[in-house]
Image (cartoon, helix red, strand yellow):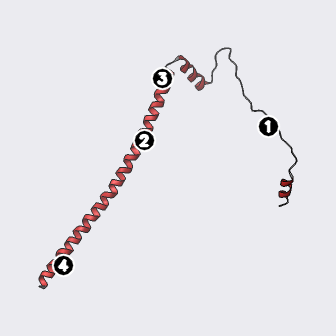
Amino acid sequence: MRAKQWRQGFFIGILMLVAFWLASLIWGLAGKVQIAVDEAHKAERRYKALEERKMVLEANLAALETSRGKDAAIRTAFGVARPGEEVIVVVQPAATATTTEPSWWEMFLSWF
């Protein structure tokens, strides 16, 4: 009877070790799956950003195909103007200092 209990205990111990080993393998795989999913999401976001950039660049290229687009690009890049054009400088109006007497409430609060 004791030998039978000893064999059962040994068998249960081996099964527990195997179960622990399998659980640790599953835990490691779950961590690797999480890393893979995160990387896939990052790659998808990068792909979408690149697609948007591609659309912007294609729109810019389409604009540069026209003579007006070329003219605008040259003016922006090199700061040039056509003969006879002059520079217009827009200046903000000077701020006028307003001097008003403080109200009774402001005077009251200034005591504190």
Q: Is mark 1 on a helix, strand or loop?
A: loop
Circles 1 and 3, Cβ within 8 Å, touching? The answer is no
Question: What residue does disc 4 label?
Answer: 9
Give me the C-alpha separation between circle 3 and circle 4.
Answer: 78 Å
Q: Which residue is drawn at 38% across and 48% down?
A: 39
**Quadrant of the drawing holding the N terminus:** bottom left
> Label 2 near label 3: C-beta < 8 Å?
no
Label located before the other in sequence (3 or 2): 2
Which of 5/89 is in front? 5
Residue tagged 1: 95
Residue positioned 68% across, 14% down in the render: 84
Of labels 3 and 4, earlier in sequence is 4
In the rendered view, does 14 fall on the left or right side of 64? left
- Residue 64, how many percent across, how many down? 51, 22
Where is residue 72, by image quadrant? Answer: top right
Tell me the quarter of the picture where residue 92 sits. Answer: top right
Amino acid type at image mark 4: Gly
Residue 45, position in %: x, y?
42, 43
**Element assignment for label 4:** helix
Residue position for label 3? 62
